[in-house]
Structures are given as structure tokens and as C-alpha cells.
Amino acid sequence: MSKVLIIGAGGVGTVVAHKVAKNPVFTEIMLASRTKAKCDQIAAAVGGGRIQTAQVDADDVSQLVALFRSFQPEIVINVALPYQDLTIMDACLECGVNYLDTANYEPKDEAHFEYSWQWAYQDRFREKGLTAILGCGFDPGVSAIFTAYAAKHHFDDIQYLDIVDCNAGNHGMAFATNFNPEINIREITQNGRYYENGEWHTIQPMSIHKQLTYPNIGQRDSYVLYHEELESLVKNFPTLKRARFWMTFGQEYLTHLRVIQNIGMARIDEVEYNGVKIVPLQFLKAVLPDPKSLGANYHGETSIGCRIRGIKDGKERTYYIYNNCDHEQAFKETGTQAVSYTTGVPAALGAAMFVRGLWKGAGVYNVEEFDPDPFLAELGEQGLPWVEKFDIDLEV
Ligand code: NDP
């Protein structure tokens, strides 16, 4: 008997619902979000009468507690927004429910990415014998599990890590983001940051870039930016001398982004407009294409992986582990594009690892702290096959 509650009915929630419904380990499934109609639509698209739906404002702990008490899930998969992480964790503690998410907590009024707020729940989850699994999407998520797998099987000393994230898909629109525009734009307009020789180095946004070659795609302009898994990876793999995160952006996308910033539309503070207070970035989100709507005309692939250098049996070794995901195939299966797909599949699989007892432990964990083997053994059949290459030029 494994009851699962999914919170959030966006692109990622859609994929999680599809994958969880296909997995018999979950005996009862509920999908809850701010707008119940969106949950109903997803439940109807999944079919089979497997998914119940509910309305909940996940900013409100008392509403969450009431929902948890009535449905009594074993685990909550949080694929709402990062703003809701702490309220959902609070409700989990109050009701004795386990927790999984795909993005670290962010305060609404500051674009600030760090695990401290969620790591602060460590003792409370441990004392209650509950598990919180943080960052179980693709990046963070599979990127950290790939790193753990490399450290376990292929290196004695893992030293240089470059996570490389390429979206070579084309949706035919002048400008759109692949997941929640507000969260996405906050992430990429902040300063970049990487780790080297025990220190964090802060850089101007997009100021370090290189052409990197992605399998089945070719060369793409790739930029160093800060990504949250770097924080937990350098802590959990202390032999790392350097850890960086690269993401590809097209020139057209960067031009739009520069204009959005220059005209003040990326602001996250309130401004008054016609007597109403609005946050420009939230308003922008309302007029940009809904990431869910991009899927129908999206062609091409994503390619996300880890390029690693270190020592094995006294010799230097290089290693590249990655997944390529096709937008059209993702859309055919779930009605969403590959960015939502690559996030939702690992979230659903991570929850299955937990309910099957393959990932366990009381407390708050980043995914690289669990055994990567059972997860990666099933990731391919869940839709995200992965490839390894040894002793190649890593380019980084
Ligand atoms: P969407 O904006 O498409 O969906 C978010 C959903 O959460 C919407 O259904 C929204 O409701 C709901 N929601 C928002 N606020 C509340 C609230 N207060 N109470 C209840 N429900 C709420 O986002 P995505 O699906 O693209 O992304 C979901 C999560 O996945 C985000 O946290 C994102 O950062 C993360 N992510 C992680 C990645 C990874 O690889 N680790 C990659 C991509 C995304 P409504 O429909 O009413 O607005």
C-alpha cells in the first residue's frame, strides 16, 4: 500500500502523474494544486481512473495539513514552485509524511539559491523517522546521481566535475522558457558561481563561455552559471577540486533576456500600476507562452550529463555520462516537452525508490547520498536511457 500525493499541476506535474500512474507500486494517487481544473485535465489525459484530484494552496500549512490528514499519503512529490518547499515540509512533519522535491527553496523576494533552509530540517525529519529527498529532477537530480555513480564505480578520486546542460530543441517561438518563466529567469539572470580549490568564485552572468560539443547535436555556445546541485556535490564529494555547471543559450534568447532586464521586466520587487501592486517578472510570466504549450511543435533533443576527470588505479581518467531526450517523443508519451519530461521522470522514479525501500534513511538527503545503482538500473526503461564514454576529450 503506497499512497502518493503529487502537488503541482504544471509541465513537471503532468509527467509525474503519467509515470506514477503507470507504476503499480503506487496503489493510490492524488494530484493537488492551486487550480483543481488543471489537475482534472491531467487526470483525464492519464486515464484509467487512477488519479484523484484536489485543490490546495500550498503556501498555507493548515490547508496542506487538512489534505494530508484526509488522504494520508506515504510520500509527497512536490512539483509546485520552490516557494512552497518549506510549507510542504512543515506539513509533512506535522502529519508524518515523507517528502521529495526537484528544486531548492527560494524566498519570493530574493533570487537566492541555497540548501541551508531545507538542510535546517535535518534534525526534525530524523527525530520523526521521516525522509526528505531534495532535488530529484534532472539537474538537480540525475546530474548528482550520475556523479555518485561515477565516484562509486569509476574513480578512486573524483576531482573535476562539469555538468553540461544543452537544450537543442526548437519550438519556433521568438522567446519562451522551458519551465516556469519566473523561476527560470530568476535563475539565469543572477551572478554565475563555481567552486575551485575550496572556494566559491562569483562571476558576472554569462561571462564565462565556450563552444562545447554535445552528442547527436554538435557544437553549442555554453555558459557557466550557478546551479544548486554544486552546493551539495562539493560537500558530499570533498575530493572535488573544481565543480562547474554549463548551460547552452542561443544568441536570440540572450538578446531577449538582455532587453527584458534592461527594461525592468525581470524585477522581482513590487511596482504600483494603476493602483495595483504587481511584480514585473510575474506579469511577464503571464504574457509569455506557457511552457506546457511548447510541446506540440518542439523538435530536437536535450542532452544533459556530467564530464568528470579524476584518478583510477593511479592513472588519470576522463568520463562522460549523459542522457539525450527527444522533445517529440516526450510529447507523444505525456503531452509535454523534454524539459518537463526529464524532470518528472526522475521525480516519479525517486519516489518509487523510496516506497520500495531501495532509498531509505531518516533525515534530509540530497539524491547523491543514496545508492545510485537501483535508480540508474531503471532510469532507461522509464524513458531516460544514459550513455557512458571513457577517456575522451572533455573540452572543459
Ligand atoms: P509550472 O509553473 O508549469 O507548474 C507549477 C504548478 O505549481 C502549477 O500547477 C501551479 O498552479 C502550482 N502552484 C504554484 N503555486 C502554488 C501554490 N501556492 N499552491 C498550490 N499549487 C501551486 O512549473 P513546472 O512544472 O515547469 O516546474 C515545477 C517545478 O519543477 C519547479 O519547482 C521547477 O523549479 C522545478 N524544475 C526542476 C528541474 C530539475 O531538473 N530539477 C527542471 C525544471 C523544473 P497554477 O497552475 O494554478 O499556477
Image (tube, rainbow, N blue to C red):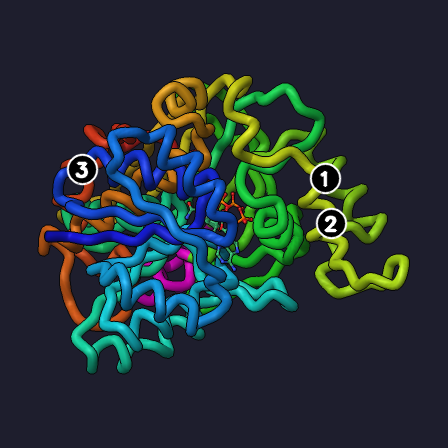
Percent position of residue 221, x then y: 59, 32
User: Marks 1/3: CA distance?
Assistant: 36 Å
Position above or below: 262 against 237: above
User: Marks 3/2: CA distance?
Assistant: 38 Å
Specify whether 199 is left or right of 20: right
| Residues at marks 3 and 2 touching, judged by CB atoms closer than 8 Å | no
| Residues at marks 2 and 1 touching, judged by CB atoms closer than 8 Å | yes
Specify whether 155 is left or right of 252: left
Kindly indicate the quadrant of the structure image that contains residue 231: bottom left
Task: Find disc 2 in the rendering and name its residue.
Answer: 283
Task: Find disc 3 in the rendering and name its residue.
Answer: 23
For marks 3 and 2, the one nearer the N-term is: 3
Which residue type carries mark 2? Phe
Residue at the extreme right of the image, as rendered: 274
Which residue type carries mark 1? Val
SS label for mark 1: helix
Which residue type carries mark 3? Asn
Position above or below: 329 against 363: above
For marks 1 and 3, the one nearer the N-term is: 3
Task: Find disc 1 in the rendering and name its residue.
Answer: 287
Percent position of residue 156, x then y: 17, 53
Q: Is residue 112 magenta?
A: no
- Residue under the point 23% across and 43% down: 349
**Residue nearest the observer in this picture, 36 or 165:** 36
- Residue under the point 52% across and 63% down: 83
User: Marks 2/1: CA distance?
Assistant: 7 Å
- Numbered marks: total: 3
Percent position of residue 125, x then y: 25, 75
Percent position of residue 316, x then y: 25, 44
Crowd class of label 3 (few under 14; some 14 to 19; many from 20; radius 10 Å):
few
